[in-house]
Image (cartoon, rainbow, N blue to C red):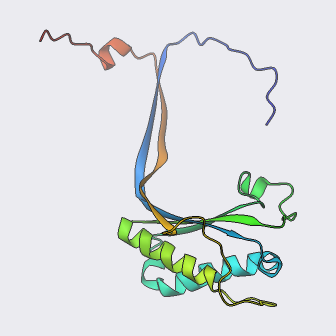
Amino acid sequence: VKVTGSRFIKNEKAGIKVEGARPVGYRTISIAGARDPGFLANLETILSGVKRRTTDNFSDLSTANSYRLLFNIYGRDGVMGKREPLRQQIGHEIGIIIEAIAPTQEMANTICSFARSTMLHYGFSGRLCTAGNLAFPYSPSDFPGGAVFEFSLHHLLEGEDEKKLFPIQWVKI
């Protein structure tokens, strides 16, 4: 991103910026690498297949939209996502972050574990080895990430007297 010509323009009215976040669940991630040319060539099929099998396995949760399963692929579009202009230009290896967000840490752990195991042993056209599709830099492979929050409030209080909103009290101890 290139930014040019920016400048500060003072607002005549004083204001107070209020921001907030809300909890959305708990996160577990697994980090893996892949470099099998067949795996890379079938990546989209594998990712959609892993999502489908995970949805089928946790169908009681899927109907309520109570969890999210995300794949972040470094070496393809891990930084820019769908805005990546060179998305089709995959290198000789990729890094995969499998992320599950669910209402409880235990559920996130279970969903991430299932998705990781499914991807590790997922069959694809031209597969030569059944020992596993992924390389894990860490053991254990899954990391509970704790509570997850999302931005939920952005408000500007204009013309408010900050001294009334945030009174200062001095207490002598």
Seen from the viewer's position, the closer of residues 77 and 22 is 77
Identify which residue is drawn at 60% across, 65% down.
137
- At 83% from the left edge and 77% from the top edge, which residue is drawn? 37
Taking the view exactly as shown, the residue that stands out farthest to the left is 173
Seen in the image, is 164 located left or right of residue 77? left
105 or 19: which is nearer to us? Answer: 105
Q: Quadrant of the C terminus?
A: top left
Name the residue at 42% across, 83% down: 60
Q: Relative to residue 119, is residue 145 depicted above or below?
A: above
**Looking at this view, is 86 or 158 the one in front?**
86
* Residue 61 left/right relative to 135: left
Residue 56, position as x, y percentages in the image: 53, 87
Q: Quadrant of residue 21?
A: top left
Horizontal side, residue 96 vs residue 172: left or right: right
Q: How many marks?
A: 0
Q: Is residue 142 above or below residue 165?
A: below
Residue 54 placement (x, y as % from top left):
54, 81
Q: Is residue 104 visible?
A: no
* Residue 94 coordinates in the image, percent (x, y): 74, 65
Front residue of 31/152: it is 31
Specify the quadrant that holds the N terminus: top right
Place of residue 85 in the rendered image (x, y in percent of width and height, measured from the top left)? 85, 54
Can residue 152 be seen in the rendering of this structure? yes
